[in-house]
Amino acid sequence: MMKIQWKKLIICLVIPLVVGGVSALLTMDAMENFSTLNQPPLSPPAWLFAVVWTILYLLMGLASYLVAVSGARHSEINAALTIYGLQLAVNFLWSPIFFNWQAFLVAFLWLILLWVLIFITLRRFATISPLAGWLLVPYLIWVTFASYLNLGIYLLN
């Protein structure tokens, strides 16, 4: 059984939560307009987004921790965490594109980029730690669903 490195775990959990929190703060005022948009079928209630994203950010953080402490080669870990950081930056920028600028088509295309980066991250993580890869599957599924919602909003508005 591996000993938990608490400092590293907390840092890994906090990073995606901060990214999500700052993104939410930057788009808070613009989110009010979201409820006025025509929504595609299967659109969840607004409160569900915060719950789901919090869970996904925690899963991302845990996955990154498992990779960071895996004992794999430094070059493998660094490559995986670099892609992870890149997808996190792309994730961060989606909210202002969608909510603040209301550039729905650009936001949809941005989500496709995010999906690809998540998939690459998942594959890299899974090579190092299969559990870390599996922890990103809900994220990939959610972004697939978010892409459907984003495209629907673009087409309906």
Image: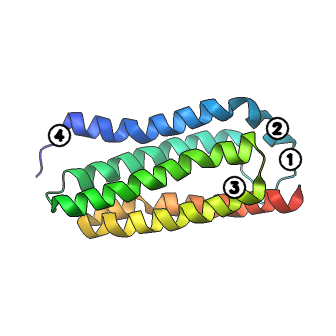
- Residue 101: percent from left, percent from top: 76, 43
**Residue identifier under label 4:** 5
Q: Amino acid at mark 4?
A: Gln
- Residue 54: percent from left, percent from top: 51, 41
Tell me: residue 133, above or below residue 8.
below
At mark 4, the secondary structure is loop
Q: Which label belongs to residue 37?
A: 1
- Residue 57: percent from left, percent from top: 46, 45
**Residue identifier under label 3:** 107
Rendered residue at 57%/41% (across/down):
51
C-alpha separation, residue under disc 3 versus residue under disc 1? 15 Å
Rendered residue at 19%/51% (across/down):
69
Q: Which label belongs to residue 33?
A: 2
Say which of marks 3 and 4 sits in front.
3
Q: Residue 45: in sight, yes or no?
A: no
Residue 110 horizontal side relative to residue 31, left or right: left
Rendered residue at 70%/60% (across/down):
108
The reply to whether discs 1 and 2 touch (Cβ–Cβ < 8 Å) is: yes
Say which of marks 3 and 1 sits in front.
3
- Residue 93: percent from left, percent from top: 59, 46
For label 3, count other residues whose C-alpha is less than 10 Å away and answer few (under 14), some (14-19) or many (20+).
many
Q: Amino acid at mark 1?
A: Leu
C-alpha separation, residue under disc 3 versus residue under disc 2? 16 Å
Q: Residue 34: in sight, yes or no?
A: yes
C-alpha separation, residue under disc 2 versus residue under disc 4? 43 Å
